[in-house]
Image (cartoon, helix red, strand yellow):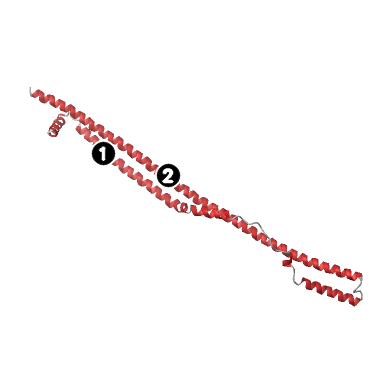
Amino acid sequence: MFGFIGDMYDNVARGLGLSNADAVEAGQASIDQLMEQANAISQQNRGLYGNYLDEMKGIYGQGAGKYATAVDNLVKAIGEAPQDFSYTGDVNDFYDKFANQRQQAAMNAMQNSGAANGNRWSSDFMNSMANKQAALSTEAWQQAYDTMMRDRSQQLQEWQAGQSNRQNYISNLGTVAGLYGNDRNQLADAYGNFYGNLASQNNADLQTQADLTMGRTNLGMQKDNGFGAILNFAGNVIGGLGK
């Protein structure tokens, strides 16, 4: 019954130009439209945030995924300590096996020459024999020593080259790990930006909804207040008619 009377009073008030209902409803409709637009913009922004994260995954995701393996390889390579250079060669290893035969042949030739000249047992001849044998032994030993040193020098160069290659390998592993680490950091920053943007968007949405809801509520209260004043006016009019 009250609803019917309320509608009647409202229609009367509209007709008399005493009601703000039309303006309030128009304002509420505008607020509803703003709410729809705000929701649409919010969804659009969220889509942009998602697209941004997908792009960052495409750029940095693959490298970031390899970071742990790259670091593990680097740690293993560094952990393999280089061995000090060690040479196990010996002069005897390079001593010409035919040197003794050549020395013996030389001694035999000198003895035969001394016997032919009749001075085989002279002190000068014996000294000459001893000196010759010493010279031949020294020459053979020197040749063996020189050969050993050349072999040692070659092995040292090969060891140094291996160490240089190892250092280059470790350096390259470090460079790769650094590149993948940068990708990992970039992707982490992208995730931080993504969730930060979402949080900001949620706060903005909440504030917008609160502001627009409050505005709509205030307009409704203005309508209700206006309607209450109209009821009082109508009551007075009806009461006056009854006198």
Which three-letter amino acid code belongs to the residue tagged 1? Asp
Q: Earlier in the sequence, mark 2 or mark 1?
A: 1
Where residue 111 appears, x then y in whole percent?
86, 75
Foreground of the two, 240 or 37: 240
Which three-letter amino acid code belongs to the residue tagged 2? Gly
- Image quadrant holding the N terminus, namely top left
Which mark is on residue 192?
2
128 horizontally vs 3: left or right: right
Instruction: Tell me the distance, in whole angstroms, between the alpha carbons under discs 2 and 1.
Output: 33 Å
> Residue placed at 91% from the left, 70% from the top?
123
- Please, is residue 214 above or below residue 103 in the view? above
Q: Which residue is mark 1?
A: 32
> Residue placed at 36% from the left, 41% from the top?
201
10 Å crowding of disc 1: few (<14), some (14-19), many (20+): some
Closer to the camera: disc 2 or disc 1?
Answer: 2
10 Å crowding of disc 2: few (<14), some (14-19), many (20+): few
Judged from the image, the secondary structure of the residue bearing numbered disc 1 is helix
84 horizontally vs 57: left or right: right
What is the residue that sits farthest to the left in this orientation?
A: 243
- Please, is residue 154 above or below residue 176 in the view? below
Where residue 224 appears, x then y in whole percent?
20, 30
Where residue 65 appears, x then y in whole percent?
46, 53
Q: Quadrant of residue 192?
A: top left
> Residue placed at 13% from the left, 26% from the top?
235
Foreground of the two, 2 or 97: 97
- What is the total number of numbered labels drawn onto the structure image? 2
